[in-house]
């Protein structure tokens, strides 16, 4: 099943309870001491991951033979001879990206139907068979020149699925012989793309890839962000609506990331691998390619801001797709909406009233005079890992500190609207952390407009190992469909809000009998249990009580 057809399931995420602001240093010291005693090993990003997260916004471009379907059924029947973008202008694409505020463009060089939008040696189902530029056109080469001209990075999407060659999602073929043949083709296509068009910012393997590619990436594009697959350095958020959850932790468990299909639902503040989330959404949501009748779906500026506050504002990367029409141009309605959106982002956030940075349990920003503010932006120095686990924000009004807001994750960025208030100072007090906090940015703004009404709303997510929900501080899960061999299984309860401090009163029934000795708690992870299944066919149910959170979802993964 293609990633784009997977059902999304609701996963709520909320704010951790914040402790009172007085006594913050002592409280933080005790919290830090507790974490150190428990042996938390923070995940750290690579220098390439830090650079990628600082880009914040990218522009996706979906263009191919699907652009020419014009109401036909969704298969690869549109021949290459119909692909004729007579007015194609990659400079227009780049200008739009700049207006949007994007720092790079990711081009869909091959989507699932197998049409190749560059001069490939692997197939004639490509621009070689197009009348455009007498079969000699190369969109990747044109886009490289435009990105260089407008100082943008370039990325590429190379679908592992290829209906033309009979490869299913992930590039999986029906027989070993077909797999070997397709592996050779796919590796050749990837090699062409990573060697002919200069350094790449990002490489997309949608749905992961069964074809071995790590050696090619390491040799030719070692600094590119890799989306999905065994070499992944970034992950899919888990929906195509444009929203990340909150909190959106950057850490994941290394085992959960091995398949290359982890989503934001696999986020774990104590995870031992740094794997930031990318939010992909189309401006013609949910359509990724242009059609004659989907202009009415173009997102308005207010809808784009709902996405922005719930993606970039939650520490994730935003990739906004703008699809060209059959002429090769980005349509005027799409360009106008994206441009207005980018203009308003800059109006709101280009110039803070004041900003500071600092280390420790409390960082204070002193303003030059009493000033109205309505938004606070926070950033951690993520090079040191994601240390903050809970915080409060306060503003000083007429000499007294008043609470403005609270939160849990900061990570790369947290955009936090607050009630419009005149203050002469703002401070963040970290009430829970895994190590000494390092605040890269504490900045305040007066945007003069209300934030999106859903800026703090929850988001629909998907995970390949989601097995059910729990509520009212209790869980009762049927394992029969998910435990089918003798192995160890990791059960993780993901809270919709708050944080789990303990799982207790657990009853594990396997093959009709209670099995308390086959359960283990996971050190440092109070939300996890390990289940030992020792016999084939041993399956059953597990139930228990959750302390510290009331409801959420359950993930089960074979170790």
Image (cartoon, grey):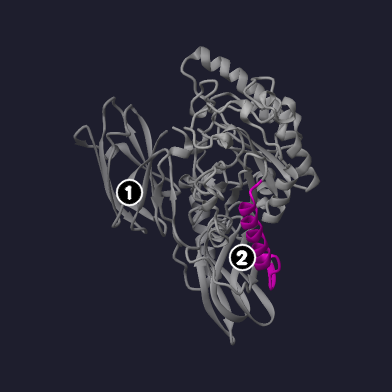
Residue 237 is left or right of residue 133, and the answer is: left
Q: Secondary structure at mark 2?
A: strand
Residue 165 is left or right of residue 142, and the answer is: left
| Chief secondary structure of the magenta portion | helix
Q: Is residue 165 above or below residue 251?
A: above
- Spot occupied by residue 187 in the image (x, y as percentages of width and height): 63, 22
Quick one: 357 or 198, which is closer to the camera? 198
Which residue is labeled 1 in the image?
469
- Residue 341 belongs to the span the image colors magenta: yes
Residue 7 makes an appearance in the image: yes
Residue drawn at x 54%, y 30% as measured from the top left: 112
Residue drawn at x 66%, y 21% as measured from the top left: 188
- Spot occupied by residue 18 in the image (x, y as percentages of width and height): 47, 67
Q: Quadrant of residue 24?
A: bottom right
Q: Is residue 359 above or below residue 254?
A: below
State the extent of the magenta-drawn residues as a range: 330-356
| Residue 330 marker | none
Q: Is residue 192 above or below residue 372?
A: above
Quick one: 301 or 501, which is closer to the camera? 301
Which residue is labeled 2 in the image?
377
């Amino acid at each position: 099943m293609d990633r784009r057809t997977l059902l999304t399931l609701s996963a709520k995420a909320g704010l951790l309870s914040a402790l009172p602001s007085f006594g913050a240093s002592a409280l933080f010291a005790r919290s830090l001491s507790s974490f150190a005693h428990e042996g938390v090993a923070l995940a750290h990003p690579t220098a390439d991951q830090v650079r990628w997260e600082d880009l914040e916004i990218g522009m996706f471009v979906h263009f191919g033979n699907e652009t020419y379907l014009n109401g036909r059924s969704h298969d690869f029947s549109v021949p290459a001879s119909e692909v004729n973008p007579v007015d194609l202008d990659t400079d227009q694409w780049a200008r739009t990206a700049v207006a949007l505020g994007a720092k790079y463009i990711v081009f869909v060089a091959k989507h699932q139907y197998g049409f190749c939008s560059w001069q490939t040696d692997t197939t004639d189902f490509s621009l070689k068979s197009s009348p455009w530029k007498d079969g000699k056109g190369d969109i990747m080469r044109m886009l490289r020149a435009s990105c260089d001209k407008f100082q943008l990075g370039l990325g590429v999407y190379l679908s592992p699925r290829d209906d033309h060659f009979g490869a299913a999602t992930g590039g999986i073929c029906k027989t070993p012989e077909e797999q070997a043949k397709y592996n050779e083709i796919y590796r050749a296509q990837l090699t062409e793309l990573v060697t002919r068009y200069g350094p790449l910012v990002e490489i997309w393997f949608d749905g992961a890839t069964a074809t071995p590619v790590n050696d090619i990436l390491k040799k030719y594009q070692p600094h590119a962000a890799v989306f999905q697959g065994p070499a992944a350095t970034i992950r899919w958020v888990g929906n195509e609506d444009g929203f990340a959850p909150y909190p959106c932790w950057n850490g994941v468990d290394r085992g959960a990331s091995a398949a290359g299909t982890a989503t934001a639902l696999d986020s774990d503040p104590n995870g031992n691998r740094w794997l930031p989330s990318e939010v992909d959404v189309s401006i013609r949501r949910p359509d990724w390619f242009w059609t004659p009748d989907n202009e009415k779906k173009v997102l308005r500026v207010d809808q784009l801001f709902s996405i922005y506050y719930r993606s970039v504002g939650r520490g994730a990367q935003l990739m906004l797709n703008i699809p060209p029409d059959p002429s090769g141009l980005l349509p005027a309605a799409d360009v106008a909406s994206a441009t207005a959106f980018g203009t308003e982002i800059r109006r709101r956030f280009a110039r803070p009233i004041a900003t500071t940075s600092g280390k420790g349990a409390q960082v204070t920003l002193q303003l030059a005079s009493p000033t109205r503010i309505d938004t606070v932006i926070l950033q951690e120095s993520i090079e040191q890992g994601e240390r903050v686990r809970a915080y409060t924000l306060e503003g000083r009004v007429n000499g007294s500190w008043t609470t403005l807001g609270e939160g849990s994750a900061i990570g790369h960025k947290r955009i936090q609207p607050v009630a419009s208030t005149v203050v002469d100072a703002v401070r963040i007090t970290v009430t829970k952390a895994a190590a000494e906090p390092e605040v890269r940015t504490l900045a305040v703004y007066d945007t003069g407009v209300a934030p999106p009404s859903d800026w703090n709303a929850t988001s629909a997510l998907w995970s390949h190992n989601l097995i059910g929900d729990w509520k009212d501080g209790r869980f009762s899960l049927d394992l029969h469909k998910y435990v089918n061999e003798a192995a160890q299984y990791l059960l993780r309860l993901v809270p919709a809000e708050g944080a789990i401090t303990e799982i207790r009163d657990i009853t594990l029934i396997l093959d009709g009998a209670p099995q308390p000795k086959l359960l283990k708690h996971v050190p440092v992870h109070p939300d996890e249990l390990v289940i030992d299944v020792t016999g084939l066919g041993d399956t059953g149910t597990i139930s228990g009580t959750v302390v510290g959170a009331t409801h959420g979802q359950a993930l089960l993964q074979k170790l």
